[in-house]
Image (tube, helix red, strand yellow):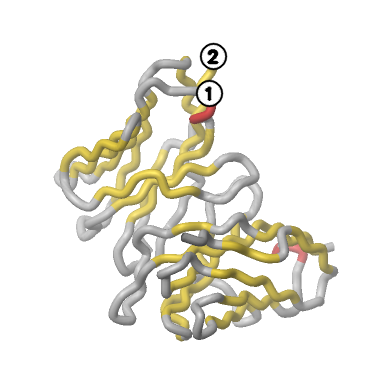
Amino acid sequence: ETGVTQSPTHLIKTRGQQVTLRCSSQSGHNTVSWYQQALGQGPQFIFQYYREEENGRGNFPPRFSGLQFPNYSSELNVNALELDDSALYLCASSLGTSGYPSYNEQFFGPGTRLTVL
Amino acid sequence: QKEVEQNSGPLSVPEGAIASLNCTYSDRGSQSFFWYRQYSGKSPELIMSIYSNGDKEDGRFTAQLNKASQYVSLLIRDSQPSDSATYLCVPGGSYIPTFGRGTSLIVHP
């Protein structure tokens, strides 16, 4: 069984740039959730994708967008980067059913550390 | 969003002792809870799931859910220095999960 993987591990960008982060879900999982974790804080939910559709969204602006592919891997895109976007970005995969948001057992990838200068 | 309350700690226990981590919640509709462990600089790791009232044991870990009193707890028996981490209590279901800052546990030799 393959676990959740994320790339890249670390990334440095400058303010105003755009970034794409990638996530491969655990084998057999069809749902991917993305989280932002600032230093000293708990993970903050960005959005969830189930079978290629956005299935729930947290309190993040539209410049945070995502995609899920037929193989259930996912991308998180952030446009017009701001200094406050510096954080650890976490992807979590889970097994969802029936198209309803599912926030049960989630398995996290190692994260991508984004630094915005 | 479902809200939970956890003492941020740090909770300090000696090696070999029982560490007791607690979490209270306000939504009586919450049916399931999950405990994640997060080491500094690492991602959260699911360690326990509990779906029904009562206790669930897995090795040195016991999760307890008391729906009448609206609290969830995690007991770690025979605590080891490697258990030193932040523990996050998260409700499940179909609502956006709220991860608080969790409880920092320090197990000292």
Question: Above or below — where is A52 with respect to A115?
Answer: below
Residue at the (56%, 82%) spot, across then down: A67
**Nearer to the camera, A50 or A71:** A71
Q: Is residue A31 left or right of residue B42?
A: left
> Which amino acid lies under the numbered mark 2 shown in the image of this protein?
Pro
Q: Helix, strand, or loop for circle 1?
A: helix
Is disc 2 surrounded by few (<14), some (14 to 19) or many (20+) residues within 10 Å? few
Q: Mark 2 lies on which chain?
A: B
Residue at the (22%, 52%) spot, across then down: B51
Question: Above or below — where is A62 with respect to B64?
Answer: below
Q: Is residue A17 left or right of residue B47?
A: right
**Residue B1, quarter of the rendered image:** bottom left
Residue sticking out furthest to the front: A1
x and y percentages locating residue A54 in the rendered image: 47, 82
Residue at the (35%, 45%) spot, across then down: B48
| Residue B109, numbered circle | 2
x and y percentages locating residue A98 in the rendered image: 28, 80
Q: Name the residue under label 1.
A: B81
Contact check, label 2 and label 1, Cβ < 8 Å: yes
Q: Mark 1 lies on which chain?
A: B
Residue at the (42%, 79%) spot, across then down: A50
x and y percentages locating residue A94 in the rendered image: 41, 66
Are discs 2 and 1 located on one and the same chain?
Answer: yes
**Residue A40, quarter of the rendered image:** top right
Q: Give the mark nearest the N terminus, 2 or 1.
A: 1
